Amino acid sequence: GAIRIPRSWLATLAAIRADSLFPVLEQADVGAQIELQSVPAGPILAPLLTPRAKQGSRATFAAEPVDPMLAVIRTERPQLEEGTTPSGMAGTVAVTAELSGTGAHPEVSLRGMADDLRIYQAHADSVEFAAVYVDSMLYLQRLDWREHGRGVHASGRVPMRLRANPAKTRLRLEPLWIEVEIPSVDLSLASLFTALIEDPSGNLYGRARLKGTPPDLFVEGDLSVNNGAFRIPLREERLSNVEARLHLDSLGVHIVEANGRFNDSGTAQATGWYRDPSRFQLQGTVRNGLVLESGNYNFLADADLEAAPIAVGDSTRPRLSGLVSVHEGAITMDLAKPGREKVLITPWLFDLDVVIPGNVRVIQPTSSVYVGSGRLQVHYDMPYWSLGGRVDVTSGHILVFNKNLRITEGTVEFLDTGTGPYPVLDISAETEIPDPEGQGPPVRIEVKVQGSPDPDEGLEITLSSPDPRNYSQADLVDLLTVGQVRSAIETGSATEPARGFLTGQVLNSLERELIREAPWLDVVEVSGGTDASDPIVISLRAVTEPQWSLRYSQELAATSGQEVALTYRISNLFFLNAAADRKRGGETTSTANETYTLDFRLRVDY
C-alpha cells in the first residue's frame, strides 16, 4: 500500500515536530490492502467493546481473627456451583482491509473471520463480518455469529465521519439502524450487553432493531428465552428453567412475563421494566426458595420483592425491598461482632421485612437456639448488615461455664444501630448436675442470661437453684464447672468432676468440627458424657430436599442405642414421620429393644 502526501519530506517532518500530522494526512491520497491472519482477538476487540456497568464484587475484610463458628454451615452447595461459565476473551481473527480515497474522505472495505471466539461469557464457533465505508456512511453488510448450529444475523447502516485522527471520528446526526435477527442463540450472548446476569445459558430468540438519530438511539423488538438459566450478580442463588418474553421500545426493556425455578426447590416470577440504572421498576415473587448468604444466613422462604431507585441525599441508589416469609432456616453470622466479615461491594440498599413463624435456628459460637414467632427488619447499606425487631426463643442450648444448658424460654431483641447486628438477650435456661454427694436426686440449676454478647457490653448471668440445700452463687458455679462444690473437691476425689469438665470442652470442640466439615448437615448436636452413667450422644440431621429430612442419633457406649427417623413435610402443618429406635440393654444383658413407628403429625405454632 501507499500513502502519498502532497508535501515535501521536510514539510512533513516539520508537521510531525509541530504535532500537526493529522491535517497533513487528511490531504494525502490513500491506497492500501492490509491482511491479518490468526491474530489474537483480545487486542482487536477490547477497544471496540463498550464497558458494561459492573455492579461490584465481593471482598473480605480480615480485621480480626474469624471465630471457627463462622464456618458453621458453608451454604455453598454443589448445585449452586454447576453451570459456571468461563469469562474473558479468546480466539483468533483474520481480517482483510482495502483502503482508497484521501485521508479526509477515505473508502474502506473490511472483511473478517473469527474462530473459536469468546467475549465475556459468550462463545461462538465462528463469526463472519463484512462492512464498507463510503461517502460518510458505514454499511454493515453482514455479521453472522454461529454457535453449535445456532446463530445471530445482523445488518445495518451507520452514518459516521471517519477522520485521520481517531479521536475525532464521530457519528453524524442522521438516521441510524441496525437490524438483528436471532433465530436461536445461547443466552450467554447477553453477557456482551449487560452485567445484570451471570453464568447465563439457555435459548434466546427473536428480533431487535437499533434505530434513531444520534445521540437519541433506542432498541425496539421482541425477545424470548426458553429453558434459560443464570445467576443473580453478587449472589449464590441460581435461576433455571426460565421462560420469558421481553418487549423492547424507546422506554426500555419490558418484562412481559418471566418465570422459572429458584435454586431447584422454589419458583420465581418477575415483571416490570428497565431503562438504565437510575430508571427501572421491577417486581418479583419467590415461592419455597432457598435464599442464602454464605457465613450469614440460609432460609427456605416465600418473598414478594420490588426493586427501584430511590433518592438518597443528592444521589439516586437502587433498592431491593419487600416481605419475606420464612419456612425454615438458620442465621449463622456472628452477632457479637460488627457485620463486616463479608462485605458486599454494591450501591444497592436492602430493606426487607422478614416474618418468622418458627423453625429457624440462630447459631452462635456459644449458643444454638430455635426461634418461635418473630418479625425482623433486615437492612443493608454497605458495608453493614443490620437487624431490627424481636423474636421469641422456644428451645436450644447455650454454653455457660463450658456447660450446655437447655433453653426453656426467652427473647432476642435486635437494635438497628446501622453498624451491624446488635442483639439483646433475655433467656432462661436450666440443667441438672448429678448429686455431688452421690446419694440424692440431681441438682437442678436455673440460669438467667441477659444483655448483649458484644464484648464491650458483656452478658449478665444469674444462677439459682430450687434445691433445698440452698447453694450459693459460688457453689452453683462450682457445680457447673467441675460438678462439685469447692469443699467437696478439697476433701474427696476430683476424678469425676474433672471428667465432666474436660468432656464438656472436648464435646464442644467435636460439635464445631462436625459442623465445619459437614456443611450438608442441617443439625449437628453432641451431648452427654458428664458422668459415667451419661453416654455421649451424636445427633445428625440432613435435609436432602426441602420436603425430606433424615435424622440419625448414635450413643457412644459399650451397649449403645441408636435412632433413625425419616420425615416428609406434606405442608407447613402436616408431617409424616417414620422412625426406628434401638434402645440399649441393661448393664447385665447385651440385648436391645427395637421399636418402629409411623406417625402422622400436626404442628401448631402458638
Image: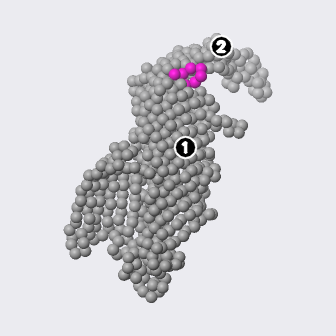
Image coords of residue 445 (percent x, y) = 46, 72
**Is residue 335 located in the magenta-colored stretch of the structure?**
no
Q: Magenta stretch: dominant SS?
A: strand
Is tag 1's residue or tag 2's residue first in the polypeptide sequence?
Answer: 2
- Residue labelled with disc 2: 174
x and y percentages locating residue 298 in the rendered image: 47, 48
The answer to whether residue 413 is above or below residue 204 is below
Residue at horizontal 59%, vertical 56%? 422
Q: Indicate the quadrant where residue 290 lies.
A: top left
Q: Can residue 259 be seen here? A: yes
Check disc 1 and report the residue beneath it.
353
State the residue at coordinates (40%, 58%): 524
- Label 2 sits on a secondary structure element that is loop
Q: Quadrant of the N terminus?
A: top right
Range of magenta residues: 247-253
Could you tell me which secondary element the residue under label 1 belongs to? strand
Q: Residue 404's spot in the image, x, y percent? A: 45, 67
User: Mark 2 is on which residue type?
Assistant: Glu
User: How far is the residue under mark 1 from the one under mark 2?
Assistant: 51 Å
Residue at the (30%, 54%) spot, across then down: 565
What amino acid does circle 1 point to?
A: Asp
Q: Nearer the viewer, residue 445 or 552?
A: 445
